[in-house]
Image (cartoon, rainbow, N blue to C red):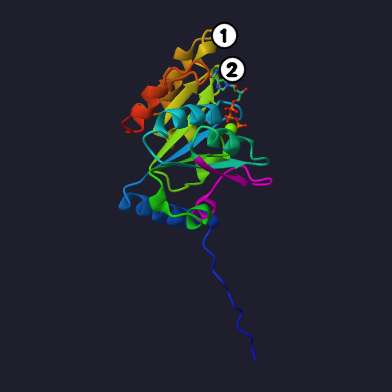
Amino acid sequence: MTQEKKITVKKPAYLQNDKLADEIREIMKSKDKLFFNVMGSIGAGKTFLLERIAEKLTPHYRIFVINGDVATTIDADRIASKGATTVQINTGGGCHLNAKLIQNELDKINIDDYDIFFTENVGNLICPSAWDVGAQLDIVVVSITEGEYVIKKHPIIFKGAQIAVINKCDLDGLGFNSDTLVEDAKKIKSDMKVICTSAKQITGIDELIAALGIKI
Ligand SMILES: Nc1nc2c(ncn2[C@@H]2O[C@H](COP(=O)(O)OP(=O)(O)OP(=O)(O)O)[C@@H](O)[C@H]2O)c(=O)[nH]1
Ligand SMILES: [Mg+2]
């Protein structure tokens, strides 16, 4: 008697992720919530920008931020100190957030208790580009101190994003001009909204909030 081999066909993880991400997007849309995914390099200023955004938005909106880092709750604590509700996911060795991690956190809260949701993805310009978290808009943050080739070398993450933020513009001109980075982002995607900010000097933050479609 020949024994039949049982074959289980598993969907690749990223296909399951995309389906779940679409479901998250649909839920947020049906509830009239905004959900933004903030990606970017290590140390580009994602947390500092989210602190500035929280300072401006929390008097008007209930903000929920999901922070991703390999370790510590430093970033979630920093943003919480500005009035947002935050949760920190420690990925261990993981270099990105994914839809399942987001859904786990959303399952623990009442989505209706908040108006606007953000992720701060794990800092790097590679892994987060491949993992949809279900946001309506993807933002990539780089900074002047990363040098003039940072956007040219990471086209994939910029292709998938709608807004590019060039932060630390208070240091503009340090070896090169921010215009180079603006041009590079537009070359990758002609309709990319590119905003120069300084989280330190609080410039460009209102423009960024307006680009997200948020009225204050
Ligand atoms: N000069 C200057 N420094 C900044 C600016 N934004 C952030 N920094 C500094 O850059 C460092 C990193 O800022 P973070 O906000 O922690 O950067 P991040 O992108 O959240 O970093 P990770 O979460 O570790 O990837 C801190 O020392 C900030 O004070 C800015 O606009 N100008
Ligand atoms: Mg951070």
- For the record, the magenta segment spans 85-103
Q: Is residue 94 above or below residue 165?
A: below
Let me know if residue 123 appears in the view.
no
x and y percentages locating residue 35 in the rendered image: 41, 43
Q: Secondary structure at mark 1?
A: loop
Mark 2 beta carbon near ligand 1 (under 8 Å): yes
Q: Helix, strand or loop at disc 2?
A: helix
Residue 8 image point, x, y percent: 56, 72
- Callout 1 touching callout 2 (CB < 8 Å): yes
According to the picture, the residue beneath numbered tag 2 turns out to be 145
Q: Disc 1 or 2, which lies upstream in sequence? A: 2
Q: How many marks?
A: 2
Spatial CA distance of label 1 from label 2 is 8 Å
Residue 128 image position (x, y, % from top left): 54, 41
**Closer to the camera, 171 or 16?**
171
Badge number at residue 174: 1
Callout 2 crowding tier (Cα within 10 Å): few <14, some 14–19, many ≥20: some
